[in-house]
Amino acid sequence: MEKEENSEESEMMIYKPLPVEVRVTLEQHSLLLGPTQSSIKKGEDTFLMSYIQKRTPVIPEELTTQFKKNFPLKIGRPAKENKKTRTRKKVLTSIEKRRLGLHKLPKTGIKYKACAPLHQLWVEYMENFLELENSAKAANKDLLYQRIAKADYHGCLLMVTRSKCPSYIGAKGIIILETKNTFQIICEDDQLRIIPKRDSVFTFNVSKWTFTLFGSHMNIRPSERAARKFKSKPTIDL
């Protein structure tokens, strides 16, 4: 009996109630601090859950998983590395090229023998380009005329057969430069002559065939002539 009484007295000593003054002070502190963050968050979650459950047929477990996800408003992209900017090389304009005389050939210093290999290469080019064995037939003559009009004549050995200017007739040489309105040829005497295309008729040979060019129909730049479509029309004699 004495042991039981001692145990009851020890329990009363451990669970002794707080004094009134301490309780009052604790309540005052709690009122001053206000509600804790955890209690606020729980209240917000319960309000949202109750609000959404009444209006959507969604399982509460799915809602809780959605609330736990983070939805960033702005996606941070890694900063781009500064790439080296390519500096373009300056190119001469057409006016600057004319001022420097890049389109003009020197009147002296060009040799006829030095241009002879160019003529041999041109003959091989024309034989492959024209395909004379097939295109010389009557059925393919229109194709042959188109190819002759579009061909490149740098290296061609031609002769002026007719012209309104008598001094040009009989001039023979290798074309080293073709412009819109002229053929610049180097003659056998190593002289550079400029022959106008207009009102002139030229002839040249490729293997066993002889061709006639009407200069008035060739007043086009070589680069533009290669991409142009020509219509078959009768030639007008001088």
Image (cartoon, rainbow, N blue to C red):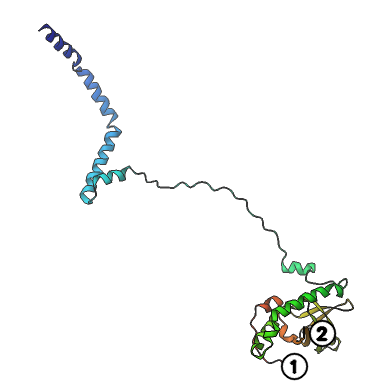
Q: In which quadrant of the rendered view does residue 131 lie?
A: bottom right
**Of 12 and 205, the residue lying toward us:** 205
Q: In this figure, which residue is indicated by the disc labeled 2?
A: 159
Residue nearest the viewer, comparing 6 with 121: 121
Q: Which residue is mark 1?
A: 237
Callout 2 amino acid = Met
- Kind of element beneath mark 1: loop
Name the residue nearer the viewer: 126 or 37: 126
Where's the C terminus, which quadrant? bottom right
Q: Secondary structure at mark 2?
A: strand
- Decide: few, some or many residues near mark 1? Use Cα within 10 Å; few <14, some 14-19, many ≥20: few
Query: Which of the labelled discs sits on residue 144, or is there none?
Result: none
Q: Nearer the viewer, residue 155 or 81?
A: 155
Residue 188: percent from left, percent from top: 88, 79
For the N terminus, the quadrant is: top left
Would residue 110 appear left or right of 67 to someone viewing this image? right
Q: Residue furthest right?
A: 189
Q: Which is closer to the viewer, label 2 or label 1?
A: 2
Q: CA distance from mark 2 to mark 1?
A: 17 Å
**Badge 1 amino acid:** Asp
The answer to whether any part of residue 145 appears in the image is no
Tell me which residue sits at (67%, 85%) in the image.
Answer: 134
Dot 2 or dot 1, earlier in sequence: 2
Q: Position of residue 47 (x, y in %)?
A: 24, 42
**Is residue 40 rendered to the left or right of residue 193?**
left
Q: Position of residue 44 (x, y in %)?
A: 27, 40
Residue 227, placed above or below residue 214: above
Q: Quadrant of residue 202?
A: bottom right
